[in-house]
Image (spheres, rainbow, N blue to C red):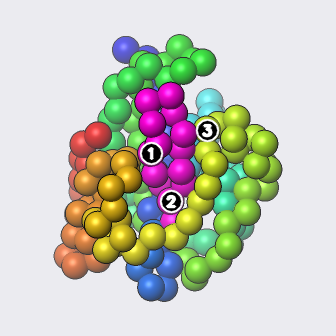
Amino acid sequence: MNIRPAVRALMLDQHDHVLLVRFEFPTGTRWALPGGGIEPGEDPITALRREIHEEVGLTQFDIGDHIWSRLHVIPIIGTDFDGQRDRVHLVRTDRFDPVPTIGWDQMNAERVFEMRWWSVDEIVASDEHFAPRRLGELVRDLLTIGAPERPVETGV
């Protein structure tokens, strides 16, 4: 299988709210963490810095530990990839208004149509679909227990 390497950020603000992006796929809406594919020759940290800058406009931030991993096997429309393997890093930041530097036309072309901050309680109580599915539980565990010693496999 041809699996696309990708990197994402669990961005938590000073109130422990999570920044999520809304994807619109033919199969439905998904709220997910900002980030994306690792380009050839990029290491994961360089890719995450580029993705955060492009998608949310943030330039000054520290990238924390690799806390989660996620493998999703599903054909990626318009590519030859059979799925994606995400590395998720913790990024703590003050609340900011996300503005994509690549512009909304490009974001829409990548199926992203909205960004917003969510509390853990909002995620847990929501009928929306999240990626990973158990995002609320994972964030709650992180906030309660702390970062894992080794990255946790999140499931789909």
Q: Amino acid at mark 2?
A: Leu
Residue that carries the numbered disc 1 in the rendered image = 30
Comes first in the chain, label 3 or label 1: 1
Residue nearest the viewer, comparing 87 with 46: 87
**Would you place residue 37 above or below residue 100 in this image?**
above
* Residue 89 coordinates in the image, percent (x, y): 43, 59
Q: Quadrant of the C terminus?
A: top left
Q: Which residues are magenta?
A: 19-33
The residue drawn where x is 29% and y is 48% is 133
Residue that carries the numbered disc 2 in the rendered image = 20
Residue nearest the viewer, comparing 81 with 114: 114
**Would you place residue 33 above or below residue 12 in this image?**
above
State which quadrant residue 79 falls in: top right
Left or right position of 56 against 144: right
Q: Secondary structure at mark 1?
A: strand
Q: Secondary structure at mark 2?
A: strand
Q: Amino acid at mark 3?
A: Arg
The residue drawn where x is 67% and y is 53% is 55
Distance between mark 2 and mark 1 Cα atoms: 10 Å
Residue 111 bears which disc, if any? 3
* Residue 30 coordinates in the image, percent (x, y): 44, 45
> In the image, which is nearer the foreground, mark 2 or mark 1?
1
